[in-house]
Amino acid sequence: GKKVLIVYAHQEPKSLNGSLKRVAVEELSKQGCTVMVSDLYAMQFEPRATRNDIVGCLHNSEEFNYGMETWEAYKRGSLSKDVIEEQKKVQEADLLIFQFPLYWFSMPAIMKGWMDRVLVQGFAHEFPNCYDSGLLKNKLALFSFTTGGTKEMYAKGSISGDIRYLLWPMQHGIMHFCGVKVLAPHICFAPEYVSEEKRMEMLIAWAERLKTLWEEKPINCTPEWYFK
Amino acid sequence: GKKVLIVYAHQEPKSLNGSLKRVAVEELSKQGCTVMVSDLYAMQFEPRATRNDIVGCLHNSEEFNYGMETWEAYKRGSLSKDVIEEQKKVQEADLLIFQFPLYWFSMPAIMKGWMDRVLVQGFAHEFPNCYDSGLLKNKLALFSFTTGGTKEMYAKGSISGDIRYLLWPMQHGIMHFCGVKVLAPHICFAPEYVSEEKRMEMLIAWAERLKTLWEEKPINCTPEWYFK
């Protein structure tokens, strides 16, 4: 069976994001997958990239360089426990699902902190092993999120621009950089402004998509996909 | 004199980011500006958007909705103290400068948390008052950052794409949404891979730019600027 890590960032289990997460756990488990969940708010996950992420002495205590220190600490096995635990889950996973409400054209800070702290050099990439030769190649990622704005607001030519514009930093800048192949995003537009019935349809559509997820081909990770 | 808020996110005062921040404080003070600094790591700024941001009772304690609760709390004056303090600085400022190292095609989580928590509905925007009629209109913003990659890596057609692609969520999705006009970004490419002399030139170039900053015209906040 495949292994899936769901990185989930919503404060409220009763939210649509909470339901989307549960639907994914249920559907994927039913398929025989092993599903791990990192419930970031429940874990009170630390988003700040600080000296505390390195256990023991620093490589250069004169001038703190987070990227350098975490790279060195990774090699020595002296990253902080919470970071190592997340890296283990990533290492085991065939698929990473990021489930979150869009905050400011991006992910909530608590999830950005997961990216900043977990995907350190040596573990996820190590120059020149980035992009297609990133260290997490052979894994898949999928960004599943809800928006405040409607689908029409995120159409090309509309004020908020094509929704794909804002996927570039997340899908290309983070996942593709680490060698991860990206499945099409799953977007629930403006769930706060639709009926309970429509929200139920959103959950069903997600469950349906998950049934054939493993047959999906990754998107073509080029600027053309984003900005054509 | 003009008022400037520098929102600064680097762990190390001796870093180039630290020096860029000091140069800005010195140069702008010399011009007679009042300069406020939010040194996020030094403040141990909380990046997580949680129930703790609302003092006292919730509007709807059955189902926690961060956007709704912070909007209501803003109107009642019951946001947490740290958020209110940042909002006061923003309110006073004519110009916001964001100084940070680029982390994963975006700002560090601690600064994303500043955006998530400070720019709440009611304060920074309130539908339909967004984009050109956002509540922070008549203010300017400038993103000043350092990169790991070289200028060549962030050229159009290169693997990391035009650097402007990744500015869309920050400049358009956040600042423009709040009505803030955006000055051209100030980018120091790959300072870790250049000589001490080159880094000194970077500091001088920033000081020089600041001398005539108030004469600059904002960028044209349209998809064309980003994706042409």
Image (cartoon, coloured by chain):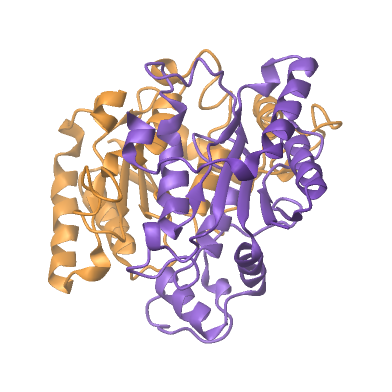
Chain colours: A purple, B orange
Residue A126, image quadrant: bottom left
Q: Nearer the viewer, residue B176 or B72?
A: B176
Answer above or below: position of B59 versus A47. Answer: above
Q: Position of residue B93 (x, y in %)?
A: 39, 35
Classify residue A3 as left or right of residue B1.
right
Q: Nearer the viewer, residue B158 or A56?
A: B158
User: Which residue appears at 71% of the width and 25% of the height?
Assistant: A202
Considering the image in quadrants, where does the N terminus of chain A appear?
bottom right
Considering the image in quadrants, where does the C terminus of chain A appear?
top left
User: Which residue appears at 56% of the width and 21% of the height?
Assistant: A149
Residue B124 in sight here: yes
Q: Position of residue A176 (x, y in %)?
A: 43, 52
Answer above or below: position of A126 versus B210. Answer: below
Classify residue A35 as left or right of residue A160.
right
Residue situated furthest right in the rendering: B62
Residue situated furthest front in the rendering: A215
Classify residue A205 as left or right of residue A173.
right
Residue A48, image quadrant: bottom right
Answer above or below: position of B75 versus A60. Answer: above
Q: Position of residue A26 (x, y in %)?
A: 81, 43
Q: How many marks?
A: 0
Q: Position of residue A157 (x, y in %)?
A: 37, 16
User: Which residue appears at 30% of the width and 57% of the height?
Assistant: B147
Residue B37 in sight here: no
User: Which residue appears at 38% of the width and 82% of the height?
Assistant: A62
Q: Nearer the viewer, residue B15 or A89?
A: A89
